[in-house]
Image: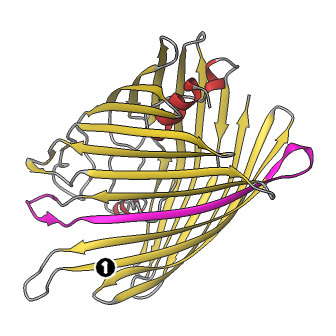
Amino acid sequence: MTTRRALLALLLTAGIAAPAEGQFLDATTVRVGPQVVQYRIKAPVDETITEAAVPMFAVVPVGRRFSVDVGTAWTQSRVKHERGESSVGGLTDTQVRGNLTLGNDFIILTAGLNLPTGKSTAGPAEILAASRIGNDFLSFPISNLGTGSAVTGGVGIARPLGNWNLGFGGSVRIASAFEPIRPDSGPRPRYQPGNEYKARLGIDRPIGAGTLAMGFTYSTFGRDDFAGSLYNTGDRYLGQVGFSTASPLGTLSLGAWNLFRSEGQIVGGQTVPWDDIANVSAALEVQTAGGNTIEPNVQLRSWFQRTAANGADAARTDRSLLAELGLRARVGLGGVTVYPGAGFTIGALATGPDATAGLTGFRASLGLQLR
């Protein structure tokens, strides 16, 4: 892997806006990815959560060292429960980012704007649906419709170190205030997010016929202000590891990540205990006739939630689990590449001490890339 490719790969996994190598040099790339995700959570929760989303993304090169990418989405989310239904939908915020490569491709500078084109205020009938899609464990394609205006700046640096490629990235996000809730009566509470600071370290190297990549991301936040009440929901630590190699059947990819959120506070000073989400996955990409591919895949995920002591109830750790079997493909159709995919999920969601609710779900997607 060249230093340039290593740098861009590391920055991409760091969450710093950087298009793939060819996107600096080739024509404009446009991606559209319609998706439907649904989870049915059984008794005692008895909820069905469905999200349909159409993410849209374009990369526009401006010369050899500068590019601009623009992304937004349309989404509709619905929660059905025994008392009725909650739904929210529309266009999401639009993100515009510029990416500048410096020197011999060792440094990338990024700057981004979050334009408030989405709905950042939820009414009483929308709050349940808006909150459910933000669940990190269930991992919906769109986690919110809008969060107000924001600016982001970042830098990524990578260098070869023997057989290793070492990269570091950092970014800062500063957001404006918005009104997340529209009550039936009275004034709308104002929410001012704290600044977000993110640092990322990544390394990769060839091993035999494959490549090993590892990364670690640390995110910390300033104190949020909700209607005059200051709080902080905790720092986040994300570790990732991936390995891909050629096999007799095709390209085998193994991956794992772990997201830990430290103890924090919510409105009113109440303590929010830590939680931890871990995920492992495997995929086998098999070449078919005409240069197309088919890729069966599987992933397993766990969620540990620490609960605070409440009166006579001692603190405990609840565990939720899910498993997903999926199938993806890549099909070239002239100037369009199509990425169909589907998956089925089973699992259990913790609902209290030694209690769980059964969970089933599915996801379907049809990605389109035009170049």
Who is closer to the viewer here, 307 or 167?
167
x and y percent of residue 55 in the render?
57, 43
Q: Residue furthest front?
A: 162
x and y percent of residue 185 in the render?
20, 57
Give the residue at x 25% y 40%: 178
x and y percent of residue 264 in the render?
17, 58
Give the residue at x 55% y 73%: 323
| Left or right placement of residue 276 versus residue 27 in this view | left
Instruction: Look at the image and say whether residue 269 sits in the magenta stretch.
Output: yes
- Can you tell which quarter of the image residue 283 is in? bottom right
- Is 64 situated above or below 223? above
Quarter of the picture holding the N terminus: top right
SS under mark 1: strand
Q: Is residue 14 visible?
A: no
- Can you tell which quarter of the image residue 56 is in? top right
Which residue type carries mark 1? Asp
User: What count of labels does the image hold?
Assistant: 1
Badge 1: few (under 14), some or many (20 or more) residues near its Cα, within 10 Å? Answer: some
| Left or right placement of residue 132 versus residue 77 in this view | left
Give the residue at x 9% y 51%: 229
Give the image's coloring scheme.
secondary structure
Quarter of the picture holding the C terminus: top right
| Left or right placement of residue 28 versus residue 258 in this view | right
Which residue lies under the disc numbered 1? 318
Give the residue at x 73% y 32%: 370
Q: Residue furthest right?
A: 289
x and y percent of residue 259 in the render?
36, 57
Instruction: Look at the image and say whether residue 262 sits in the magenta stretch.
Output: no
Magenta segment's dominant SS is: strand
Q: Which residues are magenta?
A: 264-293
